Image (cartoon, rainbow, N blue to C red):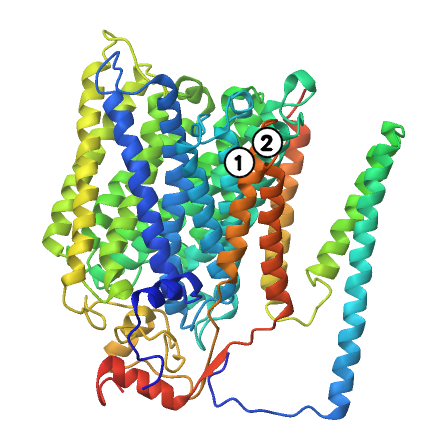
Amino acid sequence: MSSHDTPIVAKSQAQYEYDRHHNAVHMRKQVINFAIMIFFTFIAFAVVAADFSKYLIMPFVLLLAGVQVVLQLYSFMHLEDKKTHFGGVIGFFMWMGILIAFTFFLAFLTIIWW
Amino acid sequence: MSSYTQKKGFGAAVWDYITTVDHKKLAVMYLLAGTLFFAIAGFEALLMRIQLMKPNNDFVSAGFFNELLTMHGTTMLFLAATPLLFAFMNMLVPLQIGARDVAFPFLNSLGFWLFFLGAVFLHLSFFMGGAPDAGWTSYASLSLYSPGHGIDFYVLGLQISGAGTLISGLNFIVTIITMRAPGMTFMRMPLFTWTALVSSALILFAFPPLTIGLLMMLFDRMFGGNFFDHTMGGNTVIWEHLFWIFGHPEVYILVLPAFGLFSEIIPAFSRKRLFGYSSMVFATILIGFLGFMVWAHHMFTVGLGPTANAIFAVATMAIAVPTGMKVFNWILTIWGGSIKVTTPMLYALGFIPSFVAGGVTGVMQASAPLDYQLHDSYFIVAHFHYVIVGGIVTALFGSAHFYWPIFFNRMLNETLGKITFWVFFIGFHLTFFLQHFLGLMGMPRRVFTYMEGQGWDQFNYISTIGALMMGVGVILMVINCLMSIKGKPAGRDPWGDGRTLEWSIPQPIPFYNFRQTPLVRGLDPWWIEKQEGNKEVTFAEPLGDIHMPNNSAIPFVISLGMFIAAFGALYNPDADKPWSIYVLIIGLAITFGAMIARSVKDDHGFHLHKEEILEIEEHLYGKGGNK
């Protein structure tokens, strides 16, 4: 936050309307994505409750989970904002997290058994 | 007279601390809370050592001994070492990077209150039917069958305080990446800030697995889930993996900031810039990354198979390389320096050999075949206490001396400090050095007593004497801190050897830290300015209005709601306590109500005007002084 004397700059009418429209579109997108995610969670529970075959439930729930991960990253964690500051640092953190999570995934698949 | 310069009454001061979002006040609160839990956990350790002083002792019962060892480990790691390091991170990181506060002051306060109330919740277990008793690792094969509510206290308390730690970790990452003063590039950041950044990144990646593990444990214990119950198709080893995926990085979360603190103390008192700065940064990041790739070395004896054991053994040994780089860099910083052996420097000199000893035994255990011999013996106890006491506690004590003037504008007594160091240091080696040999002689860890005639009696006796000396050392340290209340104001850069920005600020530090944002012209900016004969750092901007955050009671209310809800969740499985569901609902209602209040009402903070700044500075530093 700059500590210079804070200038108060009035927005032009065009700027105001542009911002308002932009915010409304953004908000609509967030709400729709949120609804989709709740719906997916509901379907996942429903499929299990409906007692379908194991070989249907497992790939189906994993597919829903994959879609949710993408929605989470792009919509709610703003991965779609390419213009943001510190994009390189954010990218570094993302890939580091993916690499570490992949290690756990691999380990759980290979060295845990029943 | 403005409200900033008026004296406050006691009630107003308490309210100020409950609602504060100032990183310096939160640092003091972390320091006090951490010291409280450090004292409690230290007392538990003393009780255990007294029990083990002679064979067949009956000072405490076997069950209570289990509670003591569990609470000692849990408290020391989650509720003493973490908050004490957070105290230094909170105080120093914004000052070192030239910021007026952390990126999210509100979340900083929320993180503290979640940690503190979670910790209080966990400790209430002692008075409410027994503490957790399955060890700090709480392996599912023990904890699922532990009677009473002890483990439930562990699960819920750690869940709440873990959320606080995660929030604080995120806050530090954002602060360090986005709030650096002009000229403070990544490769000019003080090493403590670097270690705080890497350590916070580890918190970000390590705490979610713990949260998942605790949640599964909660389901198993309260709702009849079977994640870890092998008789119902679950697998107890999953808990061990989840715990150690968190637990091993946790060790680095604690030790990296300790490394960072010594990387500030050693150059200051060697009067030389840190040797190999860029290699120190590289080593810090590498340790952080490798820390995630080695968790299964805690589980060699589980039976992962030779391939997995070999991979994790080699990965673990690889960590010795960047750690060795750090040790050599510290030694080469001291080499040829104009050394002043002050109390912080004494702790640093004691730290290097002690920590290396802990590291060497760590590499020994990394060798899987040898680990089969050492596993669950006192050798392990000796190893990790060498790392944690020799590495982290010496860092905390040394930097308490070093940074006391930044915290409180007072110096700690140097003579008493040196006496404290020797009492504590000798006590530490007496306690833990012999435990290596107890382990090699076959004494298992976590036993409440042992039979005589196994050759363990004398070493255990000496170990207890050492523990008492450590206790005396801690008491001397506390006396020193209390004595400093009566001390004279220390003033700016009281050691005369400060290198980084935090020493450039006039004392007492005004609540906005920097009247004008500093311009950073290189590594060790305050040292550069002093070399050029400047009395102030170069400013990056003219004097102007400062934007500051408002205080808020909402973080406390959110945390209090979680605290209340935890009691409801704890007693909910009991058939004779139907009221518990209402407690749960009321608690969650308080939390969500407070969160909604926060969301609905925008809080833009306030502006501190130029005239008010001048008035505050005149009040703090006298007329015309320190302009």
User: Residue B493: percent from the left, percent from the top?
Assistant: 22, 70
Query: Which label is found at residue B217?
Result: 2
User: Residue B497: percent from the left, percent from the top?
Assistant: 21, 67
Above or below residue B409? Residue B542 is below
User: Residue B123: percent from the left, percent from the top?
Assistant: 41, 38
Above or below residue B300? Residue A37 is below
In the rendered image, the quadrant that contains the C terminus of chain B is bottom left
Q: Is residue B337 visible to the viewer in this orientation of the structure?
A: yes
Dividing the picture into quadrants, the one containing residue A8 is: bottom right
Name the residue carrying label 1.
B155
Q: Dot 1: within a 10 Å radius of its alpha carbon, few (fewer than 14), some, or many (20 or more) residues?
A: many
Q: Secondary structure at mark 1?
A: helix
Compared across the picture, whether B289 is left or right of B536 comes to: right
Compared across the picture, whether B585 is left or right of B518 comes to: right
Query: Which label is found at residue B331?
Result: none
Q: Nearer the viewer, residue A50 or B439?
A: A50
Residue at 42% x, 43% y is B120
User: Residue B47: percent from the left, percent from the top?
Assistant: 27, 28
Asked whether the beta carbons under mark 2 and mark 1 sit within 8 Å of each other, the answer is yes
Furthest-top residue in view?
A: B453
- Amino acid at dot 2: Met
Chain-order first, disc 2 or disc 1: 1
* Label 1: chain letter: B
In the rendered image, the quadrant that contains the N terminus of chain B is bottom left
Q: CA distance from mark 2 to mark 1?
A: 7 Å
Residue at 58% x, 54% y is B590
- Amino acid at dot 1: Val
Q: Are marks 2 and 1 on the same chain?
A: yes
Dividing the picture into quadrants, the one containing residue B222 is: top right
* Label 2: chain letter: B
Residue at 64% x, 32% y is B219
